[in-house]
Amino acid sequence: MYFEYVLVENFIIDYFILACTGKLLKEKGKWLWLGSLLGSIIAVLCPLFNLTIWSSLLIKIFSSLLLTLVCFYSKKFKRFALNYIVFLLMTFVFGGAVEGLKQLIGSVTLEIALAATFVLFIALKIVIKAMNRKKVIDSFSAEVCIIDGDKRVEETGYYDSGNLLYDPITSQPICLITHEVFCKLYGGDIINIFLNKIDEKKLKNGHYIDVNSAVKKGKMLVFSVDEIIVRDEKEEKRFENVCLGLSFSNFEKAMHSEILLHSSQLCH
């Protein structure tokens, strides 16, 4: 019964470790089930021998190398070394979680160990997904300075390849801003802004355009500003007489940006 217990527990834990390693490396990995089986077999056989601390350590190193070779092999040494290090990191995380649970509640049954491992696996998947999404968003983000007369506002902007909105009157591409940015530029009552009760004549080239979405139809306030300056890690871009549109789509929550730059400005 003991061997079946150790075999099943280590197989599932090793599978979760390998799956999380693949998520972190952005690789699917190969033969995860085979790697998990090999790891669990080694875990079952090791206690049968009277191994010294150093012998046990060498076997664990060999085991982790074997699993990395089977599931995340790479001909490039640097890439394989990275795969191996990430696998070791995930092993320490899962192993530490199980040991911490044992210290917390004492003896741990197979069901508790597997449940805790599964919860940790789901949590790590969520964290890794969020980290990858943030990395993608950061790679398309830039510092944006909007200048209109003596008014100047600096916010984070996002290069949105999906922003294909053009002003039907001037044929200019439209950068979208939130109501917070609009208030910083021109002030105003937030209620009137939401109700579209803004005197567009007080804004340069101010007018309303019809916008359609999958959910509803509406109007968007569009106007021009003197200049916007876009700074990223590589360069600084300047755009004069830029058309802005006041948006209430809550894109700032998804993109962590207050300004959506137009797709045409990606390759300017």
Image (cartoon, rainbow, N blue to C red):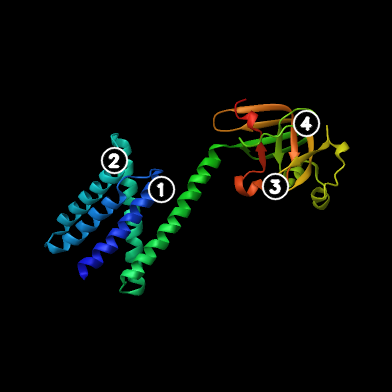
Q: CA distance from mark 1 to mark 4?
A: 44 Å
Residue 93 in the image, given as x and y percentages of width and height: 36, 57
Query: Which residue appears at 67% of the width and 43% of the height?
Result: 258
Quarter assignment of residue 257: top right
In the rendered structure, the answer to whether residue 14 lies left or right of residue 254 reads left
Secondary structure of the residue carrying tag 4 is: loop
Q: Could you tell me the amino acid type at mark 3?
A: Ser
Question: What residue does disc 3 label?
Answer: 249
Residue 27 in the image, given as x and y percentages of width and height: 38, 43
Q: Nearer the viewer, mark 1 or mark 4?
A: 4
Residues at discs 3 and 2 in contact (Cβ within 8 Å): no
Question: What residue does disc 2 label?
Answer: 73
Q: From the image, which quarter does the C terminus lie in?
A: top right
Secondary structure of the residue carrying tag 3 is: loop
Mark closer to the chain start, 4 or 2: 2
Q: In terms of depth relative to the viewer, which is nearer, 265 or 147?
A: 265
Residue 168: mark in rendering:
4
Mark closer to the chain start, 3 or 2: 2
Question: What residue does disc 1 label?
Answer: 23
Furthest residue to the bottom? 106
